[in-house]
Image (spheres, coloured by chain):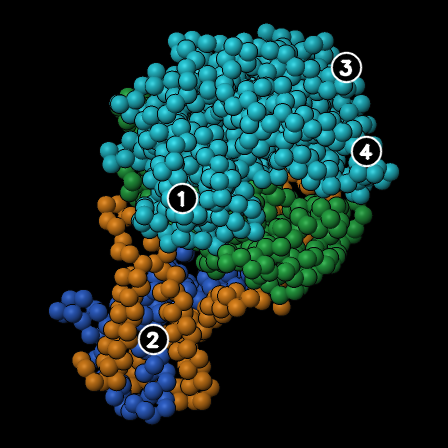
């Protein structure tokens, strides 16, 4: 029984939660299963799914952990839209809530999807600080005794928004290009690469831009802007991808004018 | 084909960008007057008779910069690149991922041919 | 049955696990490091840390001061040699984290900014607005991707440590995705699986914090230390238990009771002029006393008090505490810029854990531990805010260095013996899968366990409820062996995983219950109504709990004292 | 309309350990208002291509002399052309509105030392340029100015 802040109790409302079920060893094709759940007024969609798991049907499988929209495990399609179920209030929906696994991902089981494809793209953009010089002779860049790099608040502001991605993959479910071009790097991976490109401490731009222009190129993005619409942390991956395009064009043009020495070598 | 496209993507996207930005800005006036108002008679087509059209088309700034022809070239060429690029992504969005290489190549070929014709026509004025 | 061999096996992909993997991979490029985690590393609960990480940074600060604050915060139960090592390594570790890309908030001169935190005499908590855990975990995870010799086993559940003639040589891991068991073998194992907050009903911890590492070590015969000390963070949202960072008070937020009084100033709760920035155990006790004195507010999820940030203004809140604002609006429908946030003390951290020395080594050769799972004991009876993340880095790296050293010197042990243990474990778990004949329901036992722990081991404890709790948990331990499981599928059987986690939770809870019941004094987070004073003569020692089928056997371990003599803890 | 989503998009580099071809929910991403607007936005590509070629035809006629130009202008009065150009006008405006809304987002935080102006400023500038150029061109073509 929950209540508004003024205290009077709001009775739970009965809702039908439709969950997509699929067990690779038993089902040929995913099937829908309906559960009737007494939903408290302030419940999130995840609370309803947890109620089903605890009380009604323990065989439902799904991923979740922090329930405070910061770990990114509980992304699912709710009534056709990719959502973080721990952050989406049940009140926004009528009495039928259809929960499916994330679109554009192979299904492992019930609401659990295959992440290896995403992780592979994630690692492909070399998401780490790359320094031209190794640490030892890099001392000049470090901030006097504290061995940290010096970075102004403004420099931090250039990439901060893109560093807020919690890898919940909702943008991959919303992106039409991901649906049709399997090797497209995808919004989150490009946003992460761009985050490092924009970090004043990183010197790996050239290498990452080469990756951005290679297989699964950033130019496959057709700026549907859906990824930024569904992003629960307003990372704005669409901005990152299109800024990455802009950088890639400049880099490409520079490459024509002054062929730069290949910058391979340091990993 | 796909690898060739991959190499030229930055240039293609740049042309698309000019196409959608400058193309849209230039096209609006042209379509409004030449395409809609004059044929409907709201604006008298005589205002754009042969002499007037040539005068505009070959107008130049300080006798040096062929402004008329430059704007005309942009108006003819740039929209083709926006068109080709967007049709390509439309086809990809409808499940055309695998054939994207060929389809994309053909569309850009159309844009190149169109650009050639446009520039030839403008230069020939 | 697959067996894969590595140099070392790290269990747990959070702050400590990733830091250990990086340290081992960086120093030994040819070594193969297995990183086994039951969730993808970026989902580890480190992600939800908000406040910051402590390390000496400012000129007006010193290792000495940070050390003393930590010892005093630990109510003199922390080992002072470990604390000395910890404060000395802390700045280097946080600087490394910054070099790896962690977006720390900055001062005007470009150096890393620091903020005030509970129990700290000077500002030494490095922060990234209010999402340090998230940024640290992602920086570490992305940095770990650089090393090709780190082999990740994502979504593998480790249910047993493999011990071969007294030496820990790997783990039996269940691949959640296929339901098959694998023997992941190495010449050393590091446990970095975090704490066990989910044994309590109202906790900031995520659902994956089920004390797996502690239970693994305990079942393997390694003692658990100081398990009775559970930290209640003063400010958690009622109902969900979501953490509202101490940084809100570090930036100047006030705690107010139902009459709007700043009770930490208007009444004497032993925090002196530090008021809202007192140590966590004292502030949590103050809040409970305010509520018991009838000056709390009541709501659908019990009594609470107000955390008032309205005087900080929208700019400060948006610049320094954006996540707090988002959480308050999303989960309690309150905008902290205009209204106070309802908060009440919530289980947050377990000071206790697997007993390790300063190098992260446990009594069992080849077995190491680091982070919240371990109890090096720099936290003693109460951890100071923002020391935990730094502890993960410092002792994650230390454990990795010493584990690699140990692994280079030791032999492989026989694969056959290890495989036999894994086969046996696989058989045991296979019987559990879809076990229809059981009579107990997972959610029922979890609810009962939570209720027992809430009543017996809250902010205020007393002998009778604790003794009753010991009996109740022991009874639950018997019942958890008779679970009824509905799901007999092989692929991603989360019910089976939850059952294994529940077993770990009950075992960890029993150790906590027995350890708490025996400590007849009030020290740090362990506060008894019937033994209100700290008794250094009889209880200045670490509680050791060893596994025994009949129930945990308690022992003692001396506290390593040093330059700071135990004194009365006054702020 | 759209075929089922690509069976293996986001397929893992090594085959999924559960089954050779794990199924995937048929995604009907295109039938939401935002996505329909986006698809329409892309569909205007056809209009741009055709308008471009019509304009090329007109200018080639201009190059061929007064008779050809007059015939070309005459041909535009055919209702089919008028319909097409009205549709083109709507398309161009629709493209401008959506593209100008998204354009500020694609600006890099800094181009060398320069900082692009904040979003709304760019947004307003785009509209001013668009309307300004359209006005000047229309008046010029209509013979009012120049």
Q: From mark 4 to mark 2, how far is it between C-alphas?
A: 76 Å
Q: Is residue C531 visible?
A: yes
The colour applied to the residues of chain D in this rendering is orange
Please tell me if label 4 and label 1 are on a single chain.
yes
Assign a secondary structure to mark 1. strand
Colour of chain A in the rendered structure image: green
Q: Nearer the viewer, mark 3 or mark 4?
A: 4
Which residue does the numbered mark 1 point to in the structure image? C256
Q: Is residue A70 left or right of residue C468?
A: left
Residue B28's label in the rendered image is 2
Spatial distance from mark 1 to mark 2, Cα to Cα? 62 Å
* Element type where label 3 sits in the image: helix
- Say which mark, if any, is on residue C482: 4
Label 3 to label 2: alpha-carbon separation: 80 Å
Say whether mark 4 and mark 3 are on the same chain: yes
Picture residue at 52% right of the left edge, 10% below the top: C537
Chain hosting mark 4: C
Which label sits in the foreground, 3 or 2?
Answer: 3
Image spot of residue C555 (x, y percent): 63, 12
Q: Which residue is mark 3?
A: C417
């Amino acid at each position: 029984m929950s209540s508004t802040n003024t205290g009077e109790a709001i009775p739970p409302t009965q809702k039908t939660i439709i969950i997509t079920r699929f067990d690779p060893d038993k089902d040929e094709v995913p099937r829908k299963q309906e559960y009737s759940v007494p939903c408290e007024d302030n419940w999130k969609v995840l609370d309803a799914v947890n109620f089903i798991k605890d009380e009604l049907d323990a065989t439902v499988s799904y991923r979740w952990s922090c329930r405070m929209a910061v770990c990114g495990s509980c992304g699912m399609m709710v009534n056709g839209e990719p959502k973080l179920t721990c952050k989406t209030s049940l009140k926004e929906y009528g009495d039928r809530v259809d929960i499916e696994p994330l679109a554009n991902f192979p299904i492992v089981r019930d609401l659990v999807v295959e992440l290896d494809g995403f992780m592979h793209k994630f690692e492909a953009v070399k998401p780490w600080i790359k320094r031209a010089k190794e640490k030892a002779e890099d001392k000049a860049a470090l901030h006097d005794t504290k061995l940290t790099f010096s970075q102004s608040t403004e420099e931090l502001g250039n990439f901060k928004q893109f560093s807020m991605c919690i890898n919940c993959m909702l943008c991959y479910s919303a992106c039409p290009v991901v649906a049709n071009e399997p090797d497209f790097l995808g919004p989150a991976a490009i946003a992460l690469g761009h985050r490092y490109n924009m970090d004043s401490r990183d010197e790996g731009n050239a290498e990452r831009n080469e990756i951005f222009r290679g297989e699964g190129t950033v130019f496959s993005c057709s700026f549907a802007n859906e990824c930024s619409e569904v992003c629960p942390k307003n990372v704005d991956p669409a901005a990152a991808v299109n800024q990455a395009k802009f950088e890639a064009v400049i880099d490409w043009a520079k490459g024509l004018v002054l062929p730069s020495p290949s910058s391979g070598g340091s990993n | 084909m796909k690898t060739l496209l991959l190499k030229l993507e930055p240039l293609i996207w740049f042309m698309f960008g000019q196409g959608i930005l400058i193309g849209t800005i230039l096209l609006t006036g042209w379509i409004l007057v030449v395409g809609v108002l004059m044929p409907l008679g709201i604006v008298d087509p005589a205002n754009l008779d042969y002499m007037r059209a040539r005068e505009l088309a070959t107008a130049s700034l300080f006798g040096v910069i062929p402004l008329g022809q430059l704007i005309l070239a942009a108006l003819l060429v740039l929209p083709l690149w926006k068109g080709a690029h967007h049709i390509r992504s439309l086809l990809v969005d409808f499940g055309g991922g695998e054939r994207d290489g060929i389809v994309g190549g053909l569309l850009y070929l159309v844009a190149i041919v169109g650009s050639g014709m446009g520039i030839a026509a403008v230069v020939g004025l | 049955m697959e067996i894969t061999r590595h140099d070392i096996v790290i269990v747990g992909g959070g702050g400590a696990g990733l830091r250990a993997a990086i340290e081992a991979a960086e120093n030994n490029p040819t070594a193969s490091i297995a990183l086994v985690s039951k969730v993808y590393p970026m989902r580890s609960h480190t992600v939800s840390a908000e406040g910051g990480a402590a390390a000496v940074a400012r000129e007006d600060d010193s290792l000495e001061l940070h050390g003393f604050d930590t010892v005093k915060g630990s109510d003199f139960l922390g080992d002072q040699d470990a604390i000395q090592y910890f404060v000395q390594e802390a700045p280097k570790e946080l600087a490394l984290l910054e070099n790896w890309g962690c977006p720390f908030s900055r001062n005007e001169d470009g150096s890393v900014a620091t903020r005030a935190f509970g129990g700290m005499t000077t500002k030494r908590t490095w922060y990234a607005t209010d999402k340090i855990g998230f940024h640290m975990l992602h920086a570490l995870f992305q940095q770990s991707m650089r090393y090709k010799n780190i082999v990740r086993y994502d979504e593998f559940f480790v249910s047993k440590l493999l011990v071969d003639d007294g030496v820990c040589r790997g783990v039996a891991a269940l691949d959640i995705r296929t339901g098959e068991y694998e023997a992941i073998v190495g010449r050393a194992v590091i446990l970095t699986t975090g704490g066990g907050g989910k044994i309590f009903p109202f906790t900031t911890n995520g659902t994956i914090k089920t004390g797996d590492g502690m239970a693994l070590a305990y079942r393997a015969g390694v003692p658990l230390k100081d398990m009775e000390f559970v930290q209640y963070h003063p400010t958690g949202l009622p109902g969900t238990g979501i953490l509202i960072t101490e940084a809100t008070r570090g930036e100047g937020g006030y705690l107010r009771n139902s009459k709007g009084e700043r009770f930490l100033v208007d009444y004497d709760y032993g925090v002196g002029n530090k008021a809202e920035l007192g140590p966590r155990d004292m502030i949590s006790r103050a809040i409970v006393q305010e509520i018991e004195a009838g000056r709390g507010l009541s709501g659908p999820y019990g009594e609470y008090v107000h955390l008032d940030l309205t005087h900080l203004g929208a700019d400060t809140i948006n610049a320094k505490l954006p996540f707090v604002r988002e959480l308050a609006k999303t989960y309690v429908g309150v905008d902290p810029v205009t209204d106070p946030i309802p908060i009440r003390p919530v289980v947050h951290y377990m000071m206790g854990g697997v007993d390790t020395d300063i190098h992260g080594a446990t009594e069992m050769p080849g077995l190491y531990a680091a982070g919240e799972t371990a109890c090096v004991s720099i936290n003693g009876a109460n951890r100071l805010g923002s020391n935990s993340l730094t502890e993960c880095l410092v002792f994650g790296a230390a454990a990795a260095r010493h584990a690699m050293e140990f692994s280079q010197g030791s032999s492989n042990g026989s694969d056959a013996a290890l495989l036999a243990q894994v086969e046996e474990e696989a058989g045991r778990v296979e019987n559990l899968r879809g076990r229809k004949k059981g009579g107990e329901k997972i959610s029922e036992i979890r609810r009962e366990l939570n209720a027992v722990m809430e009543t017996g081991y809250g902010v205020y404890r007393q002998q009778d409820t604790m003794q009753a709790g010991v009996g109740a948990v022991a009874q639950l331990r018997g019942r958890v062996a008779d679970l009824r499981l509905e799901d007999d599928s092989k692929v991603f059987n989360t019910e089976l995983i939850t059952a294994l986690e529940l077993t770990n939770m009950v075992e960890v809870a029993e150790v906590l219950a027995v350890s708490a019941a025996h400590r007849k004094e009030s020290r740090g987070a362990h506060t008894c109504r019937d033994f209100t004073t700290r008794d250094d003569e009889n209880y200045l020692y670490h509680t050791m709990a060893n596994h025994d089928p009949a129930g945990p056997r308690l022992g003692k371990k001396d506290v390593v004292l040093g330059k700071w003599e135990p004194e009365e803890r006054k702020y | 309309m759209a075929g089922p989503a690509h069976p293996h998009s986001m397929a893992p580099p090594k085959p999924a350990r559960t089954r050779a071809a794990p199924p995937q929910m048929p995604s009907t991403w295109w039938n939401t208002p935002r996505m329909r607007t986006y698809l329409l936005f892309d569909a205007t590509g056809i209009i741009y291509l055709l308008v471009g070629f019509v304009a090329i035809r007109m200018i080639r006629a201009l190059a061929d002399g007064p008779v050809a130009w007059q015939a070309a202008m005459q041909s535009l009065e055919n209702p089919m052309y008028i319909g097409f150009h009205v549709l083109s006008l709507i398309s161009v405006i629709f493209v401008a509105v959506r593209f100008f809304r998204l354009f500020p987002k694609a600006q890099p935080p800094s181009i060398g030392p320069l900082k692009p102006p904040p979003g709304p400023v760019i947004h307003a500038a785009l509209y001013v340029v668009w309307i300004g150029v359209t006005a000047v061109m229309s008046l010029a073509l209509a013979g009012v100015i120049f």
